[in-house]
Image (cartoon, rainbow, N blue to C red):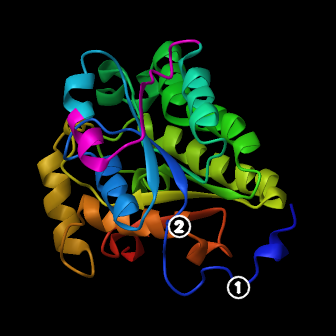
Amino acid sequence: MNPNTRAGAGRSTPSLTGKKGLIVGIANEQSIAYGCAQVMRELGGAIAVTYMNAKAEPHVRPLADRLGAEIIAPLDVEQPGQMEAVFAQIEQRWGRLDFLLHAIAYAPAADLHGRMVDSSAAGFARAMDISCHSFVRMARLAEPLMKEGGALVTMSYYGAQKVVPNYGIMGPVKAALEATVRYLAAELGPGGIRVHAVSPGPIRTRAASGIGEFEKLLDDTASRAPEHQLVTIADVGAVTALLCSDAARAMTGNVVFVDAGYHVMG
């Protein structure tokens, strides 16, 4: 498609009315993905929600129902065929996809808590596959469903660009994810598909609880950030929803910080 055919569409007010989106990464009410999904629904978007496995389903399904999710499906990105099944269900139900949120990351505890130089090849590869390459696979499956363009958004962190104590192998993995965003933006841009990484400041989520001395990181961030505060999942959700809307149609390939300005400090 020619992106110029959409000139002037929906620039002034962010809206997702009439748009269909896939949300991957909701684990509980504290999840960044849940905060994003709430704002996306408030802006009129219809959503599909995934849960990792049978153990996670009782925690995620009530939230998906609360959000009015039109599709609720299992998705463990390490299980062959599950991702394809989700996108097949989206194609059958909606026939298209307008936005996608990838908010999953993982590293084995031994590799996350150890020194980078001591990380195992298997642990590093698994962290890269789940946290980074799964986004590539989702983009591949989303592309044919985004015939009129769309937006792909993933979640990064400041540790991709600077060394953050106790962040371990996730720093290099998130750096790869941010580079992936730029390459996908270049490749998919001619089809009107925009790609971004959102980089939130530290938030108390289940995933963050695995980072050593996390409370100290929270205190340091709040004290050093120009706004002297921590961000919330609603803050991240507002920016992510904006990026998925036509109001951000002239933006792609960015790492967008939502961290009360922490990243600008030396």
79 lies left or right of 10: left
Q: Can residue 10 be seen in this view?
A: yes
Report if residue 186 lies within the magenta region.
Answer: no
Q: How many numbered circles are shown?
A: 2
Instruction: Where is residue 222? Give x, y as percent.
Output: 18, 69
Q: Position of residue 101 (x, y in %)?
A: 49, 48
Query: Which residue is at 38% across, 38% downward?
Result: 25
Q: Position of residue 139 (x, y in %)?
A: 66, 40
| Residue at figure coordinates x 24%, y 66% from the top left | 231
Mark 2 and mark 1: span between their CA atoms?
16 Å
Mark 1: secondary structure:
loop
- Above or below for 62 versus 34: above
Residue found at the far front of this picture: 93
Q: What residue is drawn where x is 43% and y is 31%?
A: 116
Kind of residue at disc 1:
Gly
Residue 104 visible in the current orientation? no
Magenta residues, as a range? Answer: 62-80
Amino acid type at image mark 2: Leu
104 or 57, which lies in front? Answer: 57
In the rendered image, the vertical position of residue 61 relative to residue 187, given as above or below: above
Contact between marks 2 and 1 (CB within 8 A): the answer is no
- Label ID, residue 8: 1
Residue picked out by circle 2: 243
Q: Residue at x 68, y 34 (%)?
A: 141
Q: Does the magenta stretch include residue 78?
A: yes
